[in-house]
Amino acid sequence: MQQQRPRSGAYSRRRPAGNRNQRPTRKKPTNTINPSRFINKAITPEADVPYVPTHAFQDFGLDGRIVKNLDYLKFIKPSEIQDRCIPLTLAGADTIGLANTGTGKTAAFLLPIIDKLLANRELVSALILAPTRELAQQIDEEFRRFSSGMKLYSTLAVGGQNIGRQIHQIQRGPHVVIGTPGRIKDLINRRVLRLSTVTTFVLDEADRMCDMGFEKDIRTIEAELPKQRQTLCYSATMTKSVQSIMEEFMVTPETVSVVKQATNDHIEQDVVHFENKDHKVEMLMSILARDEVEKVVVFGETKFGVQRLSDAISKNGIPSEAIHGNKSQSQRERALKMFKDKNNNINVLVATDVAARGLDIPDVTHVINYDIPQAYDDYIHRIGRTGRAGKSGTALTFIQKR
């Protein structure tokens, strides 16, 4: 018999009038970061001891169609988070997965969801929340890959895309709804999205959603869910907000932690001094022209500034794309796709901090902080786009001479 879980109805207050889809913003800290924190001589990271899984994918008892798709997609061995979480989730346990980005956690929750759907094709059976449009898009793409040929359907519900199309897709009846908290809440308020049939609720990157100001929206959404359900929560850190959510939303959860201590010691970090705006642009163009700068993410502070900088880089003969909040979802997806494509000549991506968290962009050799981040945590997330998967990386931060 499943235990009863308390509903969080007290959190169902409406957001004040205004733009419903506007994402809550964090207050900018008033303190400045000491430039010395942007300097680090890279050290060679110790080689990780490869994880030896206790299962093969066929050992989990997944539907044979899933295993066949995994074979086709060259998924040979489960990662540690998959190896340890999939059996718990298949057994029906509320599961907490603590894992860094890039550890395979998406498959850890998607494969059990697909397996459950193949046994019972109830519509709107799973709701998956993610902090950003890009991450929600990546989850949707993975769902479609893993469930190919199974006649299971998902709807992506995020801001920046046509809400009328999303309403139409939901009215057609998907099996899985994947979205950002703001848009999901909007669809609930419009009485389009009903969550009474949800049996699996997933919070992906829960710490980031709370950090971005979505905690109240998450609580409002949770209050619409059935009490009897399975809740899966994935996070890189256990903050007070995440712990509070887990305690309220989950019933005797099983916890799996594969988090490795975050360190950027293997990333070469230095500062670039400039005298004025013209000199700053000149220095950037000089750096981008270097042979060793193969694939670079340049971070700026404002949406307008990022677009203007990307245009300036392109005019200087270096193809560049920009992603920021003023671009539509399709424009952002196109820019990221072009930047990721090895056959494309777009090797510079200029972005606001919207791209700093969660995006897995392979082979980035350099991160350039053209504008200083507001907080050191933002700096860490930014430079984490390089030096991934055991590779070296370089981070440069522009500092004005005094």
Image (tube, rainbow, N blue to C red):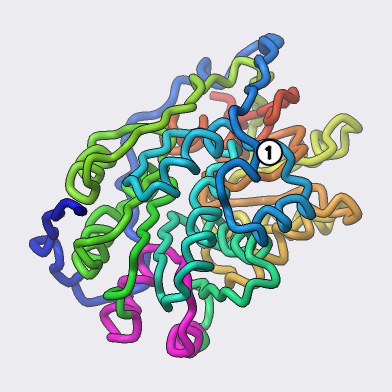
* Residue at left offset 51%, top offset 18%: 37
Residue furthest to the left in view is 10
**Can you say which quadrant of the picture contains the C terminus?**
top right
Residue 44 shown left or right of residue 376 in the figure: right
Q: Is residue 173 magenta?
A: yes
Q: Nearer the viewer, residue 244 or 357?
A: 244
Q: Is residue 163 visible?
A: no
* Residue at left offset 59%, top offset 28%: 54
Pinpoint residue 149: horizontal percent, then vertical percent: 70, 72
Number of numbered tags placed on the structure image: 1
Q: Is residue 307 magenta?
A: no
Quadrant of the rendered image containing residue 337: bottom right
Q: Nearer the viewer, residue 362 or 290?
A: 362
Quadrant of the rendered image containing residue 134: bottom right
| Magenta residues (range) | 166-193
Amino acid tagged 1: Lys
Graded by Cα atoms within 10 Å as few (under 14), some (14 to 19) or many (20 or more), the crowding at tag 1 reads some
Q: Is residue 110 visible?
A: yes
* Residue at left offset 49%, top offset 50%: 109
Dot 1: element: helix
Q: Which residue is mark 1?
A: 280
Q: Is residue 87 above or below residue 130?
A: above
Q: Is residue 271 above or below residue 2?
A: above
Pinpoint residue 341: horizontal percent, then vertical percent: 82, 54
Residue 276 shown left or right of residue 219 in the figure: right
Quadrant of the rendered image containing residue 327: bottom right
* Residue at left offset 49%, top offset 79%: 174
Q: Nearer the viewer, residue 27 or 148?
A: 148
Q: Nearer the viewer, residue 113 or 315?
A: 113
Residue 216 shown left or right of residue 202 in the figure: left
Pinpoint residue 135: horizontal percent, then vertical percent: 54, 55
